[in-house]
Image: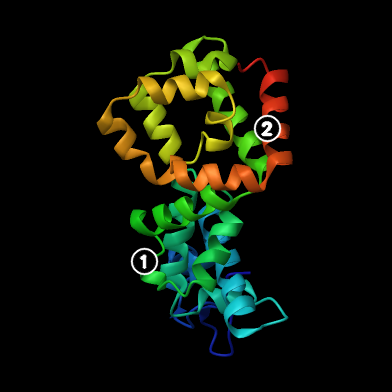
Amino acid sequence: MTSKLNSDNMYECEHCGKEFTREKTLIVHVCEQKRRHLQQDEKGVQVGFLAYNRFFQLAQGATKDKTYLSFSKSPYYIAFVKFGRYVISRIIIEADTYIDWLITQRIKIDEWCFEATYDLYLKSKLLTEPVEPALERTVKFMQEWGEEQKAEWNHFFYYVNMNKAVEMINAGKISPWAIYNCKSGQKMLEDMNDEQINLIETVINPPWWKKLFKQKQLDVDFAKDVLKTAGIE
């Protein structure tokens, strides 16, 4: 219940304590705490709440989750909700992992929504993630591209617009695990101009991947087999 009749026969807001003589006035009354209470089921708020709890777990060793009420009264509520809405508004590769990375790297919460912060996370993740999720995500976004373009998704590397490919590679949608382990992916890189290569250089980083592939030959064989089975030559 948002309203209650107190001992002075006044209707009192349970969120801020303000009193009203008429219940109708209380019903339309919206204080900041009531607004936060009403917003608790919004996706962005829920992500912010999750990040808030994760912060206390990783940074302060908390073993018990905070309540939504304590979150709504926190001085950091606005910052965490802003971050939650940022996560919902753009495609974040493994949001849970990103939240943990932000906390363990001790990134200031005011910088959690910076594109430069996400870019730093993404580049480090793309260079170190296991082959399975990298290929799974690549296939997913190739299929989406195929539906949008009304094209065979497994012909992605042959027909994708080069600028679109640059965008997707930098966004983590297309992994070097796929690019380097099929002929069509390598051909796509050969067809790019110097400017396009420079834009994706951090992700495709040839020396890094050459060294990694030498260390993980079984994963390379797995990637080639998956791509071949999918019809990606």
- Between circles 2 and 1, the one closer to the viewer is 2
Q: Is residue 141 among the parts visible in the rendering? A: yes
Three-letter code, disc 1: Glu
Which of the two labelled residues, at mark 2 and mark 1, occupies the earlier sequence position?
1
Q: Quadrant of the N terminus?
A: bottom right
In x, y percent, where is residue 23?
A: 51, 69
Numbered mark located on residue 223 in the image: 2
Where is mark 1, residue-wise?
Answer: 111
Is residue 83 shown above or below 33? Answer: above
Residue under the image location 41 percent in, 64 percent down: 112
Residue 88 appears left or right of 201: right
Which quarter of the image is occupied by the C terminus? top right
Depth check: give the residue in front, 131 or 173: 131
Q: Is residue 31 visible?
A: no
Q: Residue at x 45, y 19 (%)?
A: 187
Q: Residue at x 49, y 43 (%)?
A: 91
Q: Amino acid at mark 2?
A: Ala
Q: Secondary structure at mark 1?
A: helix
Using a 10 Å C-alpha cutoff, classify the residue at mark 1 as few (fewer than 14 neighbours), some (14 to 19) or many (20 or more): some
Q: Is residue 210 above or below residue 86?
A: above
Marks 2/1: CA distance?
A: 36 Å
Residue nearer the viewer, 199 or 102? 199
Q: Element type at marker 2?
A: helix
Q: Position of residue 172 (x, y in %)?
A: 49, 41
